[in-house]
């Protein structure tokens, strides 16, 4: 009996202590990227990923509040045959975004790649080309009017080697059919046509290389400043930022400074950070590489927040979010791990450092 009393007392004390522990508030933890950030955090996603992979879909919904369609909105996807426009995959993405209150940054109206064969072989005079160009822009922009927040209107119009506009060099894969048939002012007209079709959308010029290619950066800045001066309805610049762990932090900082000085919105629009830029065949993703990548993610997010004024911060978007879905290994035929989630959709050091960079 006496023992029963002591055992009861002991149990009560243990219970009390357990209750006390429960009452202590847990340390504050940021649960996801979107709640850590004062501006939208996005990723490129695909309708196939959303449809076939619940982990993909769940991870995206938990972490992000902006999306860019990976390929569905491109010309070759929506109009494989002339006159047969099919928005099924795009509309799937739009409905998903509406359901989960996710911003849609649509990509892209005018690009020299991802064109249907009939456009590449189209023969017509300049009026016929202008008509094709305008009809494509306005039909698509009108279809998504009020459903997308913004568009990459023109993508990658500037060459890598001298900052000139892509032009006739179609054979090398470096030219632009648009510049060739429509003259250099096609860029301004693309923005005007898109604005006529969807006056409420923010309109972006999107390109890559700002952080490593000075002439290209300067040419881009001169292009957008001239458009602004002429009253062409451009709202922002997309800095794709397909970059790597070796890129110079000074270059990143000065590119962001120069771009922000245009006064336009700045979207880091396709971020990924390669750890194998030199295509090493036997590379292993060591802890050292993991940490170098994590530091670069953090640096980019912190620098963006420090340099771009809040009113110009359109957001940071990675190109997909898991190493499983990155374009880089297939495109460059190499091993790489460029994104914040690993191939099993588990958070990498890069994820936690990006989170810190968005919040610190
Ligand atoms: O990642 C995209 C890939 O799935 C598509 O097949 C490809 C062609 O449509 O485009 C890739 O995305 C590119 C983007 O549209 C523009 N910047 C470079 C991206 C990677 O190549």
Image: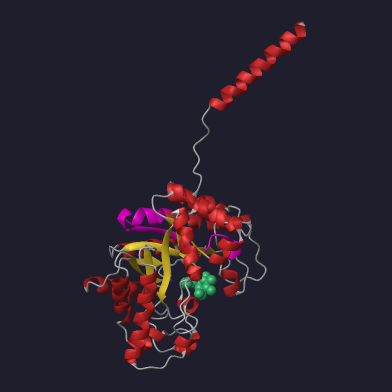
Q: Nearer the viewer, residue 59 or 355?
A: 59
Colour mode of the rendering: secondary structure
Q: Position of residue 336 (x, y in %)?
A: 60, 66
Q: Position of residue 7 (x, y in %)?
A: 73, 13
Q: Position of residue 352 (x, y in %)?
A: 53, 50
**Residue 246 seen anywhere in this rendered image of the structure:** no
Magenta residue span:
302-325
Up the image or down, 357 lies above or below 79; here it is above
What residue lies at 58% left-to-right and 58% top-to-bottom?
56
Where is residue 194, by image quadrant? bottom left
**Residue 137 seen anywhere in this rendered image of the structure:** yes
Asked whether 305 falls inside the magenta stretch, the response is: yes
Asked whether 203 falls inside the magenta stretch, the response is: no
Where is residue 122, by image quadrant? bottom left
Q: Nearer the viewer, residue 46 or 97?
A: 97
Q: Nearer the viewer, residue 20 or 138?
A: 138
Q: Position of residue 213 (x, y in %)?
A: 41, 73
What residue lies at 35% left-to-right and 90% top-to-bottom?
128
What residue lies at 68% left-to-right and 12% top-to-bottom?
9
Up the image or down, 313 lies above or below 276; here it is above
């Amino acid at each position: 009996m006496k023992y029963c009393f002591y055992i009861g007392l002991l149990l009560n004390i243990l219970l009390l202590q357990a209750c006390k522990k429960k009452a202590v508030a847990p340390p504050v933890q940021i649960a996801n990227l979107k709640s850590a950030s004062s501006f939208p955090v996005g990723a490129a996603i695909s309708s196939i990923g959303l449809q076939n992979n619940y982990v993909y879909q769940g991870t995206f919904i938990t972490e992000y509040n902006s999306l860019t369609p990976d390929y569905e909105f491109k010309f070759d996807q929506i109009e494989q045959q002339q006159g047969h426009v099919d928005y099924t995959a795009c509309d799937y993405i739009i409905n998903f975004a509406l359901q989960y209150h996710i911003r849609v940054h649509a990509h892209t109206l005018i690009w020299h790649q991802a064109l249907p064969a009939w456009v590449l072989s189209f023969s017509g005079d300049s009026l016929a080309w202008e008509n094709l160009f305008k009809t494509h822009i306005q039909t698509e922009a009108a279809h998504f009017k009020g459903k997308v927040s913004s568009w990459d209107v023109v993508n990658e119009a500037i060459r890598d080697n001298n900052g000139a506009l892509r032009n006739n060099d179609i054979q090398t894969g470096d030219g632009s059919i648009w510049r060739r048939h429509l003259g250099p002012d096609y860029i301004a007209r693309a923005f005007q046509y898109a604005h006529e079709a969807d006056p409420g959308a923010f309109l972006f010029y999107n390109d890559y290389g700002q952080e490593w290619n000075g002439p290209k950066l300067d040419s881009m800045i001169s292009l957008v400043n001239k458009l602004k001066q002429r009253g062409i309805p451009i709202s922002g610049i997309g800095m794709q930022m397909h970059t790597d762990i070796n890129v110079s932090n000074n270059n990143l900082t000065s590119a962001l400074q120069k771009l922000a000085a245009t006064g336009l919105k700045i979207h880091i629009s396709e971020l990924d950070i390669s750890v194998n830029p030199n295509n090493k065949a036997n590379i292993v993703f060591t802890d050292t590489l993991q940490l170098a990548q994590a530091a670069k993610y953090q640096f980019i997010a912190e620098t963006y927040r420090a340099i771009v004024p809040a009113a110009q911060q359109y957001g940071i978007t990675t190109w997909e979010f898991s190493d499983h879905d990155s374009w880089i290994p297939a495109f460059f035929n190499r091993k790489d791990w460029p994104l914040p989630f690993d191939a099993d959709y588990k958070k990498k050091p890069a994820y936690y450092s990006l989170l810190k960079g968005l919040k610190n």
